[in-house]
Amino acid sequence: MELKDIQRRLRECVAASGIPQKEIAKGIGVSAQTVSKYMKKDVFPALDTFAKLCALLDVRSDYILGIAEY
């Protein structure tokens, strides 16, 4: 799995959550611009931030990473 595939899954999960990026950012302790970079640039969150993001979106990390299907 490539970063672009992980970002695609992340974008899908963010969209499905219905939570605005600003609220996601606040919930995981980063800026809204950083959340945008996670989904569009070659930037991946630190593991603790990634764990918070998955918990906030109520999605399994192995799905985002392409290890398992949703």
Image (spheres, rainbow, N blue to C red):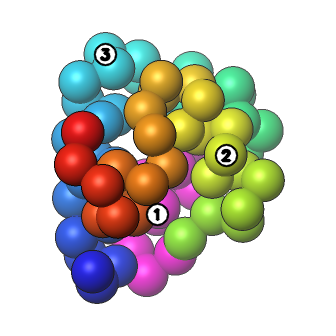
Mark 2 lies on a secondary structure that is helix
User: Distance between the Cα atoms at labels 3 and 2?
Assistant: 19 Å
Vertical position of residue 45 compared to residue 17: above or below? below
Q: In front: mark 3 or mark 2?
A: 2
Range of the magenta residues?
31-43
- Please give the name of the residue rendered at 43% of the width and 81% of the height, measured from the top-left corner: 42
> In the displayed structure, does residue 53 sit left or right of residue 21?
right
Q: Residues within 10 Å of mark 3 (few under 14, many from 20)?
A: few
Say which of 70 and 48 sits in front: 70
Dot 1 amino acid type: Lys
* The disc label shown at residue 51, or none: 2
Say which of 47 and 40 sits in front: 47
Mark 1 lies on a secondary structure that is helix
In the image, residue 14 lies at what x, y percent? 34, 34
Extreme residue toward the top, this view: 18
Residue 58 belongs to magenta span: no
Dot 3 amino acid type: Gly
Pointer 3 or 2: first along the chain: 3
